[in-house]
Structure formats: C-alpha cells, structure tokens
Image (cartoon, helix red, strand yellow):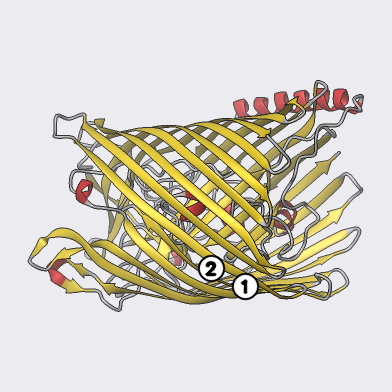
Amino acid sequence: MKAKVSTLAAAAAILCHASAVAAESDIALPTVTVNGSANDSGLGLARQNATGSRLGLSIEETPASIEALDTDTIRARGDLRVKDAITRTTGLTDTSSPGNGISYSARGFNGNSSVAMLENGQRLLVGSGTATYPSDPWGYEYIEVLRGPGSIVYGSGTTGATINAVRKAPQRAATFEALAGFGGGRALRGGIGGTGALGEKGAFRIDAFADRSDGFIDRGEARRGKILGSAAFELAPALDLSLQLDHSEQKPQRYFGTPLVNGRIAGELRGQNYNVGDALIKYVDDKAVARLDWRASPSLAISNELAYLKARRNWHNVETYSYDPATGLVKRSSYIAIQHDQEHAGNRLEARWNGSGHRAVAGWEVATINFTHTNNSPYGGTSSVALTGFAPGVFSSPDPFRPNFKTDTVTNALYVEDAYELAEHWLLLAGLRHDRYRVTRTSLLGAAGFTSTLNSNAARLGLTWKLAPGTSLYGQVSTGSDPIGSLLSMNVASSQYKLTTSRQVEAGIKQSLAQGKAEWTAALYRISKDDILTRDPANPAQSIQGGSQTSQGAELTASAELAHGWRLDANAAYTDAAFDQLLEAGNVSRAGKRPSNVPKISANAWLGYRSEAWRAGAGLRYVGKRYIDNSNVQALPAYTTLDAALGWNVNRKLQVQLNLRNLADKLYATTSYGSSQYLLGDRRHAELTAQWQF
C-alpha cells in the first residue's frame, strides 16, 4: 500500500507542475472530439457512440440497443466499481468470481466468451475464461454497453453484449481532480487525475487510483492500484499522434463463497472465509498503445493503432467447500495453484470515408497472443474445518506446481461497415467481417501438441427510420460467433471444434420527448446459437457440436425529468432463454431448460435530485431467480437491494458524498461456485467520499 501511496503522490506532483506550465500557454491543440460529457443527463440519445459502430453515429441513429453511462452519473449513484455501474444498465447481471475476474450475463448468454469487456475499443483475448481489466471507473469518461452480437465492430465472442470503457482524453486546458474516501469494511481509497499542455502542440493526462478493503468477511483483504498515462501531439497540420501507457495491480478478495447448510444460505456464516490463511489472488495488467491519425482529405481519414497488452495472474487457494451434516464440519478440496502469463501484440489499420451520403470504414486487424498456463493439476488435497472458530491452515497440495502448456495464437480480421442515407429520414447500416484464428498448442509436460485454424464470417444489416423529430424506429439482423471455451487455452479435444454461430433479429424504438427532458427506448429480440457442445447420442462418453440455444426477450429503458431537479432512471429486461437441443451425461436431454446464470427478469430504478448545493438519490436493483446448472434443479434466489447517496457541494471545487449500500441488509447470493457454495453480496455499509476539482 505504501508503494501505491507513493505513486499517487508522485503523479500529483507531476500534474500540479504541468498544470502550472499549461496555464501560461495560450496555444490551442486541434479540437478533440469527446463522446459525451459530465453534464449529460438522461439516455443521451443524440450523442455519438463509440461501441455500436465505428462510424461516429449517434445512439439514436444506430439500429441496435446501446446504453451509455457518463462518469458524473456513475459518481452520483455512488458506484465505485465498474461492475456496480454496468449492472445498473438494462439486462446486465453480475456473475463475477475470483476465478473469472469480471464476468456478466446478458440476453441469455453468460461469461467472458459471450460478453466482451473492452477499453477504448481494445480487448485482451480471454485466457481460460478470465478477464480482469478495467475494474474501477476512475479515469474514464463514460462506459457504453452494446447488447446483442457485436462481431462486426469487435470480432468474435460478443453474442450477449459488448462493454466499452472510454478513457478521458488529454486536453491542453489544465484541470486537476482528486478523490479520497473511506467506508465500511475498513475501506480506504484515493485517486488523482489531471490534464494539461505538453510543449506547443501537445497535451497529456495522468490518472492514478488506489484502494484497499478488509471486506466483510474474515481475511477478506483486497488491494488495487493503477496509473494511467496518455499524451496527444499534433505532428503536422493533418497528422496526430496519441500514446498510452498503463499499469494496474489487483489483489481481490480471497473469497470463493460460503457453503450451504442443509441446502440453505446460512446467515450466521456470512462473515466466514473458508480459504486457507496464505491464500493468494493477484492480477497485474500492463498496456501500451500508439495511434497515428492522418486526415488525408476532408473526406478521408486513415489511422494505425499499435497495441501491446500483458497480463499476469496468480491463484493459490482452496476453492471448494461442502458442509457435512453428519460431522458438522466443512470439507475443503480443490487445492488449486494457477498462473497465467499472457502477452498480446496487435495492430489495427483503418480507413474512414465521409461524403456523398456515405459514411464508411474498412480495416485490417492482426495480433499475436502468447499464453502460458502453469498449474498443479489435478489439484489434489483435502481438509476439514469447523463451521466457525477454526484455524484456516495453509496451502498444501500433493501435486507439483509446474508449467503445463503454452499456446501461440495469430489472429487476422478484415471488416467493412457503411452507413448510407437512403433518404432524408432513412439510414441503412451494413457491415461484413471475417476473422481467422490460428492456434498452436505446445505441451510443456511432453504430451502431443497441435495446430488448429478457425474461421468465422459475420454480417449486420440494420435500418433506422426517423419517424418524427426525436423519434426513431429501427430493425436489424446480425450474426456473431463465440469460441467453445477459451481460444487461448484450447486443448486437444476442443481443437476439433469450430466456432459457434449466432443469429439475431431485433426491432426497437428510441424517442426523446419534451426537448430531451424524457427519453426512452424499447427493444424486442431473438437470438439463436448453434454448434454448442452436447453429448454424442451414439457415444454418451464423447462430446460433439450439435446443441442449440434460443434466447428471446424484451427490454425497456427510460429516463425522465419529473420536476425541476428531479430525474427518474429505470429499466427492465425480460429474457426467455432455453436450450433447443442439448444432451448431458447419460444422454439426459436439457431441451426446454434455461441456461445457468440467466435471470428471467431483471430491473433497476434510480430516483435522483440535484440542486446547486445538494444532490441525492436512491435506487433499487432486482435480479430474478437464476439456475446454477442446466438441469434447472437448484437455483439462486431472486433478490432486491436498495442503495442511496447524498452529496453536498461545499463550494465550486469540493464535493462530499455519503453512499449507502444495501440499506435493508439483504442476505443474497450474486453467483454460485459449484452446487455446494454461493458467493454472497456485501452486507449493509456506508462510504464517505470527497472529490476536488480545479
């Protein structure tokens, strides 16, 4: 923690000095387009989006379901983690665990292979189902969610949704902001950020953040820290260079859930942690990006973006717990030690055209990903402890910890997208994309390796009709693809599989009323996914592709100014998801069953008030019943939580805010970790933050 505090202090000194220099300069950098602002309210249908298309279309113009959250809205609701903010959007539910890092369910599809997490349009391919970055909203301008297949824009693996966190951009006008806070679970947090001039034609931005919490369980210590740096330069009147360099370290809560007692969630065990005393979870992420933009003509722009991403992850835990009613003890198993080393180097060359009724983009993406998996498979070892008052013990496995395998993956993608104004009120959006993956696996234990090549084609055709000022109807058909498991950790068995395919039909309406004081959207969709894994009817011991799943539903999102200073934001999603064809062990059919981690109904509401000196708000979050497996026998109960926030503008530069979480102290499970243990949500607590802006 001392190192993180030192990082914050050093960054603050740099920002203060640079801001002073910037204040003396009156040379302006060319205009930088920022999608959204801290003053936006409502759904922002008229503003551009960076996630639903690469053409700079507004949310209203884009024939797809898109939702955006600016940082001011996130802060006003007291959401200090990215997943808290995202799960207030329509139909997104949290399925995160220490094993998958950050994970969501959307439109009937779950996990990091079906719901992609990006930063500024860059995605680190998922290794063994785990995604870890970004985890907190500090340093970001806004977060967008595109629901449904997004393969045209961001490639394979986005059947459920695509989430894109967009960074705050460097500006020559000097600004500085800082955050300090403390709260329940012995939480402490601090952040600084600022921007200013670099020389005569450049600008920089630095954001740093660190927090810690002892959580609400025994030995629940969590630590995070990051520093984000970016710079922009005008090299020539039509040539710009932008650079980005980031470092993030996380030690999440070493908590894998609470065992069920006689089939129930035991409130008396809410504070217990059944992991060992020397448990470890650590994520380290590094990122570097260089982007060159050339305005070749008033209609043509060409860019080249080179990115390097590195992820290192370590787990050293006892992860499975089950209560034995005969002995009254908790049996612990799965002594798991895993290490991921992942490097990703990629390049995106893109050309954009804007003229003669067409806005078009074409690009080529190429990347190489090296992934090494070290573990102690088959993860043996067992122990038993009392329900309470036990010594946690230490990690001890009979299996050696050693490098297991590595994969080298080369990806290539070509894409084209075009928005054509058919008539004054009609916009046709069409796109095509081809992806090719070449995966080579090498066993580090002497087993046979392989090379596998996968291909996918995706298309989107959408039409937006501006029925009246502020009112648009749209429809679209689109296709996408997901890998079976993770491409980077593909094994010999899965090397014979092709990518799954998905098809979506969607229609909806977007409307702005009373000069933007009220906005709402509604969507109906149907998604079919084929080639999922199922058992071979002729050989139940063997898995083959041939299963299928269908998801259909309705979504409603609304924001309205009820009176001066009062605004209500609300959304609801109905998801009817089921397997059409699926055989599991013993050739048991799961046709008609709902996939795991998919609630039929989810909803959010937030009522907020703002005046010159005060802001306040309260919100409800509802997540319906979710089954934990495909048999639909065991389910996580539905839950509703209540949050609130109260902020005071002490002066123009300082704001103090009290955030109240889970006011009713609801005992609930966010997700399961096997059939015998559930991960429980945080208990009731308060957080006090202060934010300065200069």
Q: Which mark is residue 571?
A: 1
Q: Secondary structure at mark 1?
A: strand
The C terminus - image quarter? top right
Q: How many badges with numbers are in the image? A: 2
For label 2, the residue is 91
The N terminus - image quarter? top right
Residue 72 picture location, percent across and down: 75, 54
Residue in the picture at 14% in, 34% down? 448
Circles 1, 2 touching at the beta carbon (< 8 Å): yes
Residue type indicated by callout 1 = Asn
Residue in the picture at 66% in, 52% down? 56
Q: Foreground: 69 or 482?
A: 482
Residue in the picture at 83% in, 42% down? 693
Residue type indicated by callout 2 = Gly
Answer whether residue 52 is visible to the viewer in this image.
Answer: no
Among the two numbered marks 1 and 2 on one chain, the one whose residue lies closer to the N terminus? 2
